[in-house]
Amino acid sequence: QVHLVESGGGLVQAGGSLRLSCVTSGRTFSSYDVGWFRQPPGKEREFVAAINYNGGRTSNADSVKGRFTISRDFAENTVYLQMNSLRPEDTAVYYCAAAFRSGHYDYWGQGTQVTVSS
């Protein structure tokens, strides 16, 4: 079992930045991949970024490449999503999730709201 808690969301103007945090507990932090996903209003949930269990590999959705950076802090059992150059279309509830098998995200946080005003 992995427990994940997101924080850091809020209201920001277009062009601004936010850093989301995903604090995890339960299983050994270095034993699972972590991904960030988002669900815009009225739309399906979509992949944003992921980092593998040892932090050696990351991936990003095309829509956020060059703007968002995912990282993990093994001392704090925390995964971060640094979001720069935010756009109104980044408005969504952002979720982090844990996967013990690549691509199989079985544990999810409760989400944090990000709103970008134009």
Image: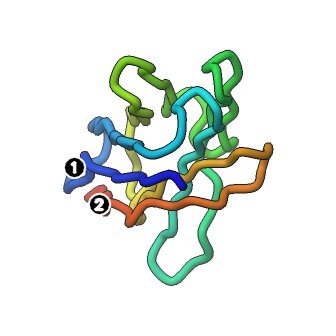
In the image, 81 versus 31, the foreground residue is 31
Residue 12's disc number: 1
Residue 106's disc number: none
**Count the marks: how many?**
2
Q: Quadrant of the C terminus?
A: bottom left
In the image, 112 versus 87, the foreground residue is 112
Label 2 amino acid?
Answer: Thr
Give the residue displayed 30% in from the left and 47% down from the top. Answer: 14
Looking at the rendering, which quadrant does residue 84 occupy? top left
Q: Are marks 1 and 2 in contact (CB under 8 Å)?
A: yes
In the image, 12 versus 34, the foreground residue is 34
Q: Is disc 2 placed on a helix, strand or loop?
A: strand
Residue 115's disc number: 2
- Residue 14, compared with residue 104, is above or below; it is above
Label 1 amino acid?
Answer: Val
Looking at the rendering, which quadrant does residue 46 occupy? bottom right
